[in-house]
């Protein structure tokens, strides 16, 4: 009997949630997240989400080239014209293409994993190379390595290579690497002899080199370890398989090639095979396309195949930046100098103390997070992650929440979360010394609170949730358990923020002000304020202890609002009252401390040393938008129109390419590093668009105006990111306000990827004949 799909669906949704889930225990659910290309600093680096375990990577290069040119970590100097995932889903896998101009090679890596059924626990990687017209006949060296991290004491790793043929015709038929790990169990990694893709009778020449490397030659230095081994063997690597903690499998090809790496876990009842790899890859492509179509299909005026293709690539690369990191961190716990603000130029003392800071090594941390850029900063950044998860929450809510849990697991006993996680020697090796040490008095915007807040809305049916089956959101019990787990940590972080970033409100002696709610980012120095995330955005100079930062107060508002919502879910009466009262005071202090009637803007404030009075510091730019960006300005708010004026004025923030960070009227515009002093940033543009969309859909005197600006800004920023992508095959950290060109970090697949959500937002252009929104259609 054939049931219509709609009927089937109706039956399925009537079943209790636990029956529709394979297994709702944590372990089983997370099985689909166990393996992945979780070393995003490499073009292709695979590892499981398990500390002290298997560790793999891919390297390649022209055989005749200087071996130093072997590709391994993502480097802009490699001149890879284009690299990235064309299609990728963090639970299933995908396909990545790299156009290596210097090697005249187009390399494609396809990765799949299986977490259900007989093959659960298996994964496979296919590596395929295509020559360009220029490189016919070229020989390519490809190296896949498998290592075991040093921390694993009872692990086994051993390679074998079965040989065929005789004398000069002796060749390696199959490579097999056997591994045993307490958490991963027993597994075999098999690399069958590559078949002959070109029909020229040259199937590739394989050797295996097994090494036992010592502590001082860590396996993350895979490239130099390989080059040393190569040199030792007189540039012709000998086949030498056996036990060891590091195994290099080198394959040499002439012309195009393709080979598979098949990982079979003993817990799976069937071994991974090349046929299965192909089948899974096809299934994944289908799933990805239909899921994208239901979730992120671009709406007019972007409803063409071209924008959909762009969106798929961008979404894939955001997900391809998901990493698993573990290792120690450098934290300066000697509170004294950092908090010592007794001298007039207090920042000088902190700065010099920083120079000879003796950080403690804190270990071990684990982090599961997306990265802003695989080239430039392949590690976790706190406020970036909240922006990444806005998109991930829709694509795969449980993954987003898993990442949120990971970040909150690093909250310390005082409530501090590091702004940036630089774990272990490998990540530290690419970070300039002065940025490595983290300080427990430095904050960063609490964007992860948005994710928890939105998840709670989904959980209670107050927001659309169209995701796949979700452990947390389809089960009220699991949802409640998650909130109960996060609640105390979020509360601790909130309370830490309130204490550690407190401002001196009293010296401002303002009428109608609540003395508890005013904040100042700690750790700032002249011209910089890294903690705020807006590094060089102009602030009052010189730094002063009387400063009050409007963005800081706005962020405390985001936390208070989220905590009030969560405390209602927790039925915690005392907390509900506390958080609601705090939120009310925050909102009224935004007006009492930060609204400048003369400037018609929200501004930072300080007490002027000349007359001892509350003084505003008002460059026109992003910081003044924060009350609006964080949702404090509802449809009837008296200062909404002035804020829209600031956004929409071409003399100030408005450009044809998006809203820029600073007005050209400001003396700081375009000066010094010109980082947050003019360029257009997509995270902030996303927030503006999200707020405008909300206001355009609510009754109010400015509803039409919000809709108009929404339509224009949405069109402008999508065009900016898309056109630049067409021209450069990548998305960028920021965009030039004069030309719209992408600039600074290429491959910035972090928050710039929010363009996917922006394209999928509704088109509110009533002129284009789409009805349903706006006052004009109400009656
Ligand atoms: C410097 C580079 C080999 C700066 O996207 C991450 C952060 C943001 O959180 C922040 O708001 N970016 C923004 O102002 C990039 C920070 C990169 C610092 C690393 C060392 C080494 O390159």
Image (cartoon, rainbow, N blue to C red):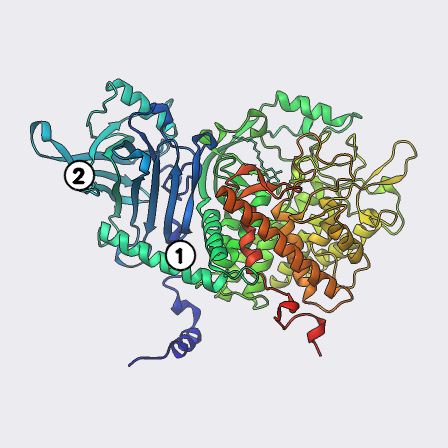
Crowdedness near tag 2: few (<14), some (14–19) or many (≥20) residues, C-alpha within 10 Å: few
Quadrant containing the N terminus is: bottom left
Residue highlighted by disc 1: 29
- Residue 691, percent from left and from top: 67, 58
Crowdedness near tag 1: few (<14), some (14–19) or many (≥20) residues, C-alpha within 10 Å: some
Residue at mark 1 to residue at mark 2: CA–CA distance: 46 Å
Left or right of 201 on screen, residue 607: right
Quadrant containing the C terminus is: bottom right
- Residue 110, percent from left and from top: 33, 47
Q: Quadrant of ligand 1?
A: top right
Q: Nearer the viewer, residue 656 or 45?
A: 656
- Label drawn at residue 304: none
Residue highlighted by disc 2: 200
**Does 693 sit above or below residue 490?**
below
Left or right of 424 on screen, residue 349: right
Tell which tag, 1 or 2, sits nearer the viewer: 2
Q: Which residue is outermost to the right?
A: 611
Q: Which residue is outermost to the bottom?
A: 1
Q: Which residue is outermost to the left?
A: 166
**Does 160 sit above or below residue 711?**
above
- Asked whether mark 2 lies closer than 8 Å to ligand 1, one says no
- Residue 66, percent from left and from top: 34, 23
Judged from the image, the secondary structure of the residue bearing numbered disc 1 is: helix
Could one spot residue 36 in this view of the protein?
A: no
Nearest to N terminus: mark 1 or mark 2:
1
Left or right of 153 on screen, residue 202: left
Q: Which residue is drawn at the image coordinates 56% and 63% (left, top)?
A: 300
């Amino acid at each position: 009997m054939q049931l219509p799909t709609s009927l089937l669906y109706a039956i399925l949704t009537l079943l209790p949630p636990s029956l529709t889930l394979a297994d709702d225990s944590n372990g089983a659910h997370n099985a689909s997240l166990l393996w992945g290309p979780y070393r995003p600093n490499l073009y292709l680096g695979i590892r499981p989400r398990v500390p002290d375990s298997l560790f793999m990577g891919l390297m390649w290069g022209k055989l005749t080239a200087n071996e130093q040119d072997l590709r391994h970590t993502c480097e802009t100097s490699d001149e890879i014209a284009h690299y990235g995932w064309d299609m990728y889903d963090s639970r299933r896998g995908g396909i990545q293409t790299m156009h290596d101009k210097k090697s005249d090679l187009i390399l494609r890596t396809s990765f799949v994993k299986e977490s259900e059924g007989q093959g659960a626990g298996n994964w496979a990687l296919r590596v395929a190379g295509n020559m360009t017209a220029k490189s016919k006949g070229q020989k390519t060296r490809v190296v896949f390595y498998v290592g075991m991290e040093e921390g694993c004491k009872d692990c086994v790793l051993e390679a074998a290579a079965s040989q065929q043929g005789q004398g000069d015709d002796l060749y390696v038929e199959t490579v097999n690497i056997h591994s045993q790990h307490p958490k991963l169990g027993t597994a075999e990694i098999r690399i069958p002899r590559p078949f002959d893709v070109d029909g020229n009778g040259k199937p590739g020449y394989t050797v295996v080199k097994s090494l036992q490397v010592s502590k001082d030659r860590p396996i993350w230095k895979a490239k130099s370890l390989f080059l040393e081994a190569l040199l030792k063997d007189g540039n012709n690597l000998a086949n030498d398989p056996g036990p060891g903690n590091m195994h290099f499998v080198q394959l040499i090809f002439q012309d195009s090639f393709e080979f598979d790496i098949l990982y079979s876990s003993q817990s799976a009842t069937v071994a991974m095979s090349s046929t299965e790899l192909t089948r899974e890859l096809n299934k994944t492509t289908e799933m990805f396309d239909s899921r994208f179509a239901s979730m992120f299909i671009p709406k007019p005026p972007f409803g063409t195949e071209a924008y959909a293709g762009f969106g798929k690539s961008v979404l894939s690369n955001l997900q391809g930046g998901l990493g698993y990191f573990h290792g120690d961190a450098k934290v300066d716990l000697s509170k004294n100098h950092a908090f010592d603000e007794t001298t007039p130029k207090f920042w000088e003392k902190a700065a010099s103390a920083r120079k000879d800071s003796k950080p403690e090594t804190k270990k071990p941390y684990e982090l599961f997070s997306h990265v802003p850029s695989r080239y430039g900063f392949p590690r976790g950044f706190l406020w970036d992650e909240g922006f990444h998860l806005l998109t991930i929450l829709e694509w795969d809510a449980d993954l987003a929440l898993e990442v949120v849990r990971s970040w909150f697991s690093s909250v310390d006993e005082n409530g501090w979360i590091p702004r940036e996680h630089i774990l272990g020697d490998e990540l530290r090796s690419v970070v300039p010394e002065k940025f490595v040490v983290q300080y427990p008095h430095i904050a960063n915007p609490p964007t992860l609170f948005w994710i928890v807040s939105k998840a709670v809305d989904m959980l209670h049916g107050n927001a659309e949730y169209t995701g796949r089956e979700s452990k947390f959101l389809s089960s009220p019990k699991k949802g409640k358990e998650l909130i109960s787990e996060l609640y105390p940590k979020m509360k601790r972080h909130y309370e830490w923020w309130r204490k550690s970033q407190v401002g001196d409100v009293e010296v401002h002696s303002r009428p109608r002000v609540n003395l508890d709610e005013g904040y100042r980012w700690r750790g700032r120095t002249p011209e910089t304020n890294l903690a705020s995330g807006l590094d060089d955005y102009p602030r009052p100079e010189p730094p002063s202890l009387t400063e009050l930062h409007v963005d800081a107060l706005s962020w405390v508002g985001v936390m208070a609002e989220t905590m009030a919502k969560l405390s209602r879910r927790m039925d915690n009466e005392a907390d509900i009252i506390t958080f609601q009262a705090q939120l009310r005071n925050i909102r009224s202090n935004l007006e009492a401390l930060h609204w400048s009637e003369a400037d018609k803007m929200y501004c930072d404030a300080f007490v002027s040393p000349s007359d001892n009075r509350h003084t505003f510091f008002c460059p026109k730019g992003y910081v003044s938008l924060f009350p609006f960006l964080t949702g404090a300005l509802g449809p009837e708010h008296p200062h909404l129109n002035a804020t829209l004026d600031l956004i929409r004025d071409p003399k100030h923030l408005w450009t044809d390419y998006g809203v820029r960070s600073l007005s050209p009227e400001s003396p700081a515009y375009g000066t010094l590093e010109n980082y947050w002093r003019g360029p257009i940033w997509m995270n902030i543009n996303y927030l503006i668009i999200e707020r405008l969309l909300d206001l355009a859909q609510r009754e109010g005197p400015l509803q039409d105006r919000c809709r108009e600006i929404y339509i224009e800004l949405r069109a402008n920023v999508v065009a900016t990111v898309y056109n630049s992508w067409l021209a450069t095959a990548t998305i960028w950290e920021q965009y030039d306000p004069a030309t719209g060109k992408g600039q600074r970090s290429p491959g910035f697949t972090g928050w710039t990827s929010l363009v996917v959500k922006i394209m999928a937002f509704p088109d509110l252009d009533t002129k284009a004949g789409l009805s349903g929104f706006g006052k004009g259609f109400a009656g």
